[in-house]
Amino acid sequence: MGNGVDPVVLATHVNFTKHQNADRIGHLIFLSFASLIILLSVLMSTDGKQAVFLPGFSSPLPDTCSSRRMLGVDCPGCGLTRAFICISHGQLSKAWKFNHASFIIYLFVAIQLPWHAIQIWRIQKGKAALYWPFIYWIPMAVAIILLTNWIWTLTRFQ
């Protein structure tokens, strides 16, 4: 090409830019969801039993656990919403009663805030996103913790 631009370098730059835009959108989505979860847990309330209330509403949200409704058995995530509300309000012993795994899950969600904010900042500065090879193991560990807690909870009352 007569303009002095190497077409391979140009194609690589275009692909890198597209990849960065996709990464940025992905990080924005994760950051938005994590922020919403933490914000709602701060704003919502619970009666300390089953009910969960949105701010400004006196009627509780409907129970969303299909496992409890259809089978009469709590699912691995049962109590997480109420536990997150309690953790955000500093009621740690109540959170423990709702779901023992809630502290680890809450920490996992809270860590998403700075992690994805830093990633977005790096991408906007033209830097590559940070890569940690074990990052994909964390959701698997969270799932194992939830399942282990669920099995332990189901078997200790038998």
Image (cartoon, rainbow, N blue to C red):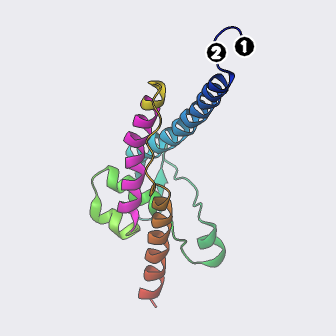
Q: State the mark number for residue 84.
A: none
Residue under the image location 45 percent in, 30 percent down: 127
Q: Could you tell me the amino acid type at mark 2?
A: Val
Residue most extreme to the right: 1
- SS for dot 2: loop
Q: Which residues are magenta?
A: 101-121
Asked whether the viewer can see residue 78, the reply is: no
- Give the residue at mark 2: 5
Question: Mark 1 and 2 residues: CB-CB less than 8 Å, in contact?
Answer: yes
Residue under the image location 44 percent in, 58 percent down: 134
Residue 154 percent across, percent down from the top left = 48, 83
- SS for dot 1: loop
Query: For this rendering, which residue is in front, 18 or 5?
Result: 5
Position above or below: 97 against 2:
below
Give the left or right position of residue 22, taking residue 130 as reference.
right
- Give the residue at mark 1: 1
Residue under the image location 62 percent in, 72 percent down: 67
Residue under the image location 52 percent in, 38 percent down: 27
Residue 103 percent across, percent down from the top left = 35, 61
Give the left or right position of residue 8, taking residue 127 as reference.
right
**Gap between marks 1 and 2, in whole Å?**
7 Å
Asked whether the viewer can see residue 31, the reply is: yes
The quadrant in which residue 107 appears is bottom left
Q: Could you tell me the amino acid type at mark 1?
A: Met
Magenta span: predominant SS is helix
